[in-house]
């Protein structure tokens, strides 16, 4: 077998190398370049999420409106069904009374009929009187029967109305249940989008290890950037209510003069809040607890209790002698 010379082996190696390089270049030229967004879904912006949130909020509001319309229709159907039942009971009572009187009259006629007919045949009693008596009896019977027939029609109409009202009520109940399920689903989706928006915000003064740089108050509201972010996020999610109070110059040893605390009022003028307002306070406090480590929330005071991020639990506070002093009409939130 012939052995290739060194020069021949070099030429063969170059041909192989050239083919490999050419193949690599051609593949690179023919393969389209993929943008980074095609490799991973881009992160939505706050603006995009807020647009999605606004659309969902409109859908949720429409569902809630339809839900309450359905509830009103259901209540009207139940009211109509109740009225129909009451009228049916009245008509049934009259019908039963008339039927009893008719049966009594029929029995009386049957028991007296033999002697009256015999009198007609024997002439013992004046036939004109007997004929008039029989005619009167028949007239009363006809009148009773007509009355019963009329009440029977009334009874049947009310029974039909009752059945229609019950069917309508069942139909509306199913519709309301469906709307309620869709409304709850929309509200859950809205909550998830709001959570995403919260996570997209950069928290001022947060270190990479999760601790927080001390901040001084700034701006016209005299609060720190971190407190301002927390206030704005709560305001967007839960509204302002009767008002939000943050900075106050009174040096009482608290966080308000330092610009690191806000009170989210639930009622006005020291009045005890309504059940709905109390629930709003619970929701604000729950949001603050959920986001405490992310946004640098140090503690929360609500309803004579305090929650601190170090312990992660509520504890009862001493009585300070009033609705506002004991924080029954507002949650208080302080940041680092």
Image (cartoon, helix red, strand yellow):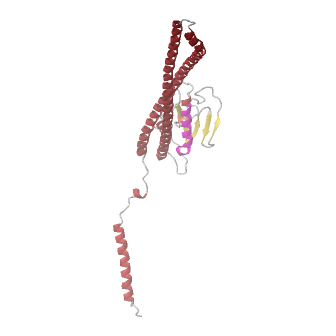
Please tell me whether residue 55 belongs to the stretch shown in magenta. no
Which quarter of the rendering shows the C terminus? top right
Residue 334, percent across and down? 55, 38
Residue 219, percent across and down? 45, 37
Q: Nearer the viewer, residue 121 or 233?
A: 121
Q: Nearer the viewer, residue 47 or 307?
A: 47
The answer to whether 252 is drawn above or below residue 46 in the figure is: above
Q: Which residues are magenta?
A: 278-296
The answer to whether 95 is drawn above or below residue 308 in the figure is: above
Question: Is residue 75 visible to the viewer in this orientation of the structure?
Answer: no
The answer to whether 82 is drawn above or below residue 119 in the figure is: below
The answer to whether 37 is drawn above or below residue 329 in the figure is: below
Residue 183, percent across and down? 48, 38
Residue reaching furthest to the bottom: 1
Residue 177, percent across and down? 51, 37
- Side of 228 relative to 298 (left or right): left
Q: Nearer the viewer, residue 130 or 288?
A: 130
- Side of 239 relative to 19 (left or right): right
Question: Is residue 137 visible to the viewer in this orientation of the structure?
Answer: yes
Which quarter of the rendering shows the N terminus? bottom left
Q: Quadrant of residue 327?
A: top right
Report the number of discs: 0
Please tell me whether residue 281 belongs to the stretch shown in magenta. yes
Q: Quadrant of residue 96?
A: top right
Task: Tell me which residue sits at (55%, 10%) in the image.
Answer: 120
* Predominant SS of the magenta segment: helix
């Amino acid at each position: 077998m012939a052995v290739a010379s060194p020069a021949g082996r070099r030429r063969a190696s170059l041909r192989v190398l050239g083919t490999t390089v050419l193949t690599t270049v051609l593949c690179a030229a023919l393969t389209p370049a993929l943008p980074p967004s095609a490799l991973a879904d881009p992160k939505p912006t706050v603006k995009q999420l807020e647009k999605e949130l606004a659309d969902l909020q409109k859908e949720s509001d429409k569902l809630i409106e339809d839900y309450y319309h359905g509830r009103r229709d259901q209540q009207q159907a139940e009211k109509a069904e109740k009225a129909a039942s009451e009228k049916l009971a009245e008509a049934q009572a009259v019908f039963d009374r008339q039927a009893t009187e008719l049966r009594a009259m029929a029995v009386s006629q049957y028991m007296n009929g033999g002697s009256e007919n015999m009198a007609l045949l024997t002439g013992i009693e004046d036939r004109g009187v007997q004929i008039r008596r029989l005619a009167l009896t028949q007239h009363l019977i006809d009148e009773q029967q007509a009355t019963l027939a009329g009440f029977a029609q009334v009874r049947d109409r009310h029974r039909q109305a009752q059945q229609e009202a019950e069917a309508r009520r069942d139909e509306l109940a199913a519709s309301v249940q469906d709307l309620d399920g869709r409304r709850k689903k929309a509200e859950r989706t809205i909550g998830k989008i709001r959570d995403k928006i919260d996570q997209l915000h950069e928290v001022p003064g947060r270190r990479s290890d999760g601790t927080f740089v001390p901040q001084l108050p700034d701006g016209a509201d005299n609060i720190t950037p971190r407190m301002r972010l927390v206030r704005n996020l709560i305001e967007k999610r839960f509204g302002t209510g009767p008002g939000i109070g943050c900075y106050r110059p009174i040096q009482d040893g608290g966080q308000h003069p330092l610009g690191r605390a806000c009170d989210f009022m639930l009622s006005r003028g020291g009045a005890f809040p309504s059940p709905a307002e109390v629930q709003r306070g619970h929701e604000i406090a729950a949001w603050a607890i959920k986001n405490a480590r992310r946004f640098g929330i140090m503690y929360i005071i609500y309803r004579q209790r305090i929650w601190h991020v170090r312990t992660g639990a509520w504890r009862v506070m001493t009585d300070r002698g009033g609705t506002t002093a004991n924080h029954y009409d507002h949650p208080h939130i302080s940041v680092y």
